[in-house]
Image (tube, grey):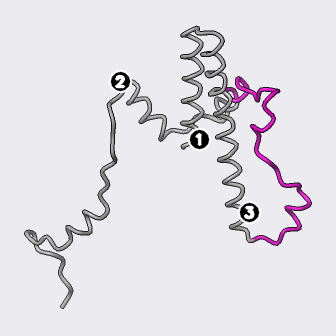
Amino acid sequence: MPARGPSKGDNSWKHLKDFFENELEARDNISNELANMANTFFRTKPTEEKAKSLAQKHLWPQNVNNLQVPKVEEHLWRQLKLKKETKAFDFAMQRSQFSLCQVMVPVLKIMDTIKSDTVPNKVKEISGDTFNILAHAIV
């Protein structure tokens, strides 16, 4: 005789459903227009051309040397007897670190602009670029 699931009025699986339901703690809403854009951007990857163009717009400041991902010398990397998974994980971490370093450039520009020049349109533009880079890093 095949096993039967819970009957219609039976709550025996409720604890499973409850375990996997997560209510995220939330704060104040933002504008609907911005929320709709964010919901779209966090699930849509920009074209590689757009991402490169944005990166070119915000190159590393010459006087911030530590805003780059450290690289292992190639001959050391080849000599290390690491599993494929370890190398893949390290590559993913380097890529994440690169994205975070990349997003720091417009953040630093915002900080510098706020300190030295309070042109609201400039702040809006750089803030928008910061958002776009972060959204690209999340996807």
In the rendered view, would you say 14 is above or below 42? below
Residue 104: % across, % down: 65, 33
Residue 48 image label? none
Real-space Cα separation, disc 3 to disc 2, in angstroms: 42 Å
In the image, 4: left or right of 31?
Answer: left
Element type at marker 2?
loop
State the extent of the magenta-drawn residues as a range. 53-82
In the picture, residue 103 is in which quadrant?
top right
Q: Quadrant of the C terminus?
A: top right
Q: Quadrant of the N terminus?
A: bottom left
In the picture, residue 84 is in which quadrant?
bottom right
Residue 95: % across, % down: 69, 48
Give the labeled residue for mark 3: 87
Real-space Cα separation, disc 2 to disc 1, in angstroms: 23 Å
Element type at marker 3?
helix
- Total residue callouts: 3
Real-space Cα separation, disc 1 to disc 3, in angstroms: 20 Å
In the rendered view, would you say 129 is above or below 80? above
Residue 72 magenta-highlighted: yes
Check if mark 3's residue and mark 2's residue have beta carbons within 8 Å: no
Q: Nearer the viewer, residue 90 or 115?
A: 115
In the rendered view, would you say 121 is above or below 105? above
> Disc 3 or 2, which lies upstream in sequence?
2
Give the labeled residue for mark 2: 31
> Disc 1 or 3, which lies upstream in sequence?
3
Check if mark 1's residue and mark 3's residue have beta carbons within 8 Å: no
Give the labeled residue for mark 1: 137
Q: Amino acid at mark 1?
A: Ala
Which class describes the residues within 10 Å of circle 3: few (<14), some (14-19), or many (20+)? some
